[in-house]
Image (cartoon, rainbow, N blue to C red):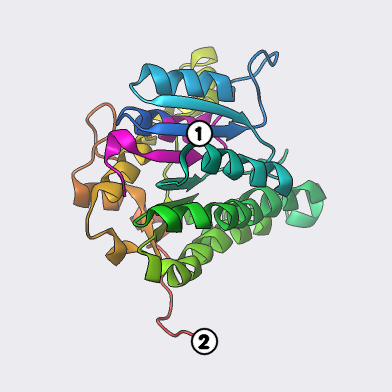
Amino acid sequence: MASSNERIVVVTGASRGAGRGIAVALGQTGATVYVTGRTAGGTPGALGTVDDTAAAVTAAGGTGVAVVCDHSDDEQVQRLFERVESDHGGLDILVNNATAIPAGLTERKPFWEKSLDQVDILDVGMRSHYVATYYAAPLLVADGGGLVVNTSSPGGRCYMHGPAYGSGKAGVDKMAHDMAHDFEPYSVAVVSIWMGILLTEQIKAGLAADPDGPLKQMAAMAEHPEFTGRLIDAIANDPGRMSRSGQVFWGAELAREYGVTDVDGSTPNSHREWLGPPTTYSDAVVE
């Protein structure tokens, strides 16, 4: 893998939230970061756009490249990686973060009383992670020593927001495990990281509107979106990262091992005692 300031990175779903924070944190290392999303600059009422994120990456010390890409469209994803190959010939880090957030996701009702749109999270989320890695794989193998990170959550192991959400997160976790097997001969590591509650633009906007409202307690438990980006940089810098490949981690716990702190110097809690340990898998291989 290239040194931090020479790395080529793709972060999907980076208009706002976790993806934006991860991209900016990796930009702080001097990397060239391609940021994808459906929301372009000038979109009325948008909480964030790919252009905003790319500018923030550049301001942080990296080179931000905005790419409008709908990750439900395989051809657009293919063109994204063709562009990266044309520009650089290889790829060091892929962060699979793009996901659908269907309306009504967090409503407390049985899945059959929610919109069938809940299954969109299996397309833009689980499936789109597969497709992005499929097209990125030749570039990661060409550079050697690359890293693929799936952003995930404990919803892959406990009940969280219903079966569509849980299946999607369980799927990307297992995908990391299985892709690691295929990537192992090429020294490309694949991990899935469970993020905690994030201090996103939406939560910040809610707090600004109602500082003492229900979001106050949630915000006190939250980690900044940049935190996971700092952790990804630490994994990429670890010469022994292949020993992590194929595993699912609480981001907060792995960060403690690496000595990574949040942007405010805090050490986020993993919430293991509440939500459980990361998923583990059998060592059996059937080919």
Label 2: element kind: loop
Q: Label 1: few (<14), some or many (≥20) within 10 Å?
A: many
Query: Can residue 164 be seen in the rendering of this structure?
Result: yes
Residue 160 position in % (x across, y down): 57, 53
Of 261 and 27, the residue lying toward us: 27
How many marks can you see? Answer: 2
175 over 91 or under it: above or below: below
Tag 2: residue type?
Val
Give the residues drawn in magenta, as a range.
1-23
Left or right: 4 with respect to 132?
A: left
Which mark sits nearer the N-terminus, 1 or 2? Answer: 1
- What residue lies at 26% left-to-right and 45% top-to-bottom? 234
Numbered tag placed on residue 34 in the rendering: 1
Of 157 and 169, the residue lying toward us: 169
Left or right: 276 with respect to 264?
A: right
Mark 1 vs mark 2, CA separation in Å: 36 Å
Q: Quadrant of the C terminus?
A: bottom right
Which numbered disc, 1 or 2, marks the residue closer to the eye?
Answer: 1
Residue 177 position in % (x across, y down): 46, 68
Numbered tag placed on residue 286 in the rendering: 2
